[in-house]
Image (cartoon, rainbow, N blue to C red):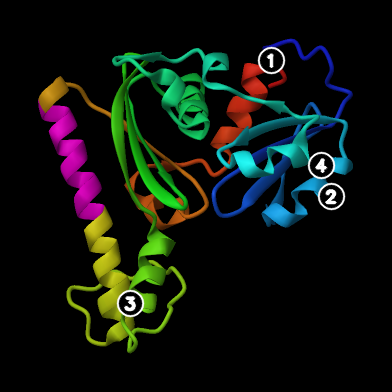
Amino acid sequence: MRFCWNCGMKWLTLDVGNTSVDACVFDGRELVYLGKFSHQELGELAKRYENILASCVKPSVQNQIAKAFLFKPEDVPIKTAFEGKEKVGIDRLLNLYGALEFYADTCLLVSAGTALVADVLVDGVFEGGFITLGLGARLRCLHERAELIPLFPLESVDVPLGKDTRSALLGGLKKEVFYYLEGLLRELRENYKRDFKVILTGGDGWFLKDFGVYDPLLIHRAMLRLKRLL
């Protein structure tokens, strides 16, 4: 049981991504998801709270949360198997720290947001990972480049073969991503001779929830744990 020296305070936790902002509030006992906000709403949201922790990958909006504690790579005690930790996105490092603290020291961590990020921990060491286009962005890209393809909302469609545009597009997306992750996981097991726990997070992580453990608030819990509030 960790001692929370200021549990009487309310803490706002912000995950400022490239597309939007996810916000939670923590009162020392419960972490509550406030919702998704635009970058334009960030400053007004921050005015309501005195105590703010933030992960921010969009430097152009940092002035709106100047009073927040902005995590930097050196704040996150994750060992890496390569040089250049300071160039790794703070969201990736915080998610890895959360995976290590709450789940396992050997895992495949998949974050599904603007990008689809797959990172690997082995015995608590960050070995590296891959960054590809996010799920929603893939749908938008096809819609923008092909006049006859509508913009479908992200849905989990599992079909042997697509029979119309919707099932062909959404079913194909699911197979593409699942086969990619299954192949990556198989390679990891072969290369490291280890089993890997699969942890999923990010706004679109629900799409992959059958693949592993889904924790949509992982980065928020990681920030609170780093500050010894959780």
Density class for disc 2 (Cα within 10 Å; few <14, some 14-19, many ≥20) is few
Q: Residue 145 carries which label?
A: 3
Between the residue at mark 3 and the residue at mark 1, the CA separation in whole angstroms equals: 47 Å
Query: Which mark is first along the chain, 3 or 4?
Result: 4
Say whether marks 2 and 4 touch (CB < 8 Å): yes
Which residue lies under the disc numbered 1? Answer: 228
Label 1 SS: loop
Q: Is residue 185 visible?
A: yes
Question: Looking at the picture, which amino acid does disc 2 mark?
Answer: Glu
Q: Which of marks 4 and 3 is in front?
A: 3
Between the residue at mark 4 and the residue at mark 3, the CA separation in whole angstroms equals: 37 Å
Label 2 SS: helix
Between the residue at mark 2 and the residue at mark 4, the CA separation in whole angstroms equals: 5 Å
Magenta-drawn segment: 178-190
Say whether marks 3 and 1 touch (CB < 8 Å): no
Q: Which of marks 3 and 1 is in front?
A: 3
Q: Residue 46 carries which label?
A: 4
- The reply, left or right, for residue 86 in relation to residue 227 is left
Density class for disc 1 (Cα within 10 Å; few <14, some 14-19, many ≥20) is few
Which residue lies under the disc numbered 2? Answer: 44
Label 4 SS: helix
